[in-house]
Amino acid sequence: MTGDEELLHVERVITRLISRYPAVSPAEIEARVRKIHERFVGCRIRDFVPLLVEKAATQEILNRRIVIPILDERSASLNSLAL
């Protein structure tokens, strides 16, 4: 894989992750992917770099995702009673 092909694959990773995680800012996803890609600069074998970058970026996104609980009617009424 040439350097240009690798960069094209990394751009595709960014696009996929942006569409997969719409709650995360596209700028944050791009920054994460580029930072992770930099870790592989010294690697001699480049064929799997985009795959490894996508896997690492996905893991980082999942580890940092904020989960907003959805309350059902019963828990919402219990919460209003606690106020």
Image: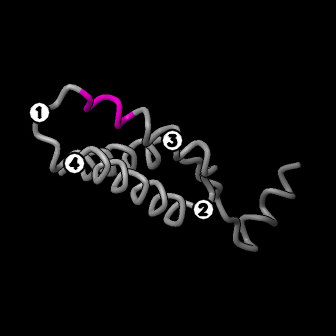
Q: Which residue is mark 2?
A: 22
Q: Which amino acid type is marked by label 3?
A: Arg
Which of label 4 and label 1 is nearer to you? 4
* Real-space CA distance between mark 4 and mark 2, rounded to the nearest whole angstrom: 30 Å
SS label for mark 2: loop
Q: Which amino acid type is marked by label 4?
A: Thr
Q: Which amino acid type is marked by label 2?
A: Pro
Image vertical order of residue 60 relative to residue 42, above or below: below
Question: Which sits earlier in the primary sequence, circle 4 or circle 1?
Answer: 4
Mark 4 burial class by Cα count in 10 Å: few <14, some 14-19, many 20+: few
Residue depicted at 47% across the width and 38% down the height: 32
Q: Which amino acid type is marked by label 1?
A: Arg
SS label for mark 4: loop
* Magenta residue span: 36-41
Question: Which sits earlier in the primary sequence, circle 3 or circle 4?
Answer: 4
Q: Position of residue 53 (x, y in %)?
A: 31, 45
Q: Which residue is mark 1?
A: 44
Q: Which residue is mark 4?
A: 2
Residue depicted at 30% across the width and 28% down the height: 39
Q: Is residue 19 left or right of residue 81?
A: left
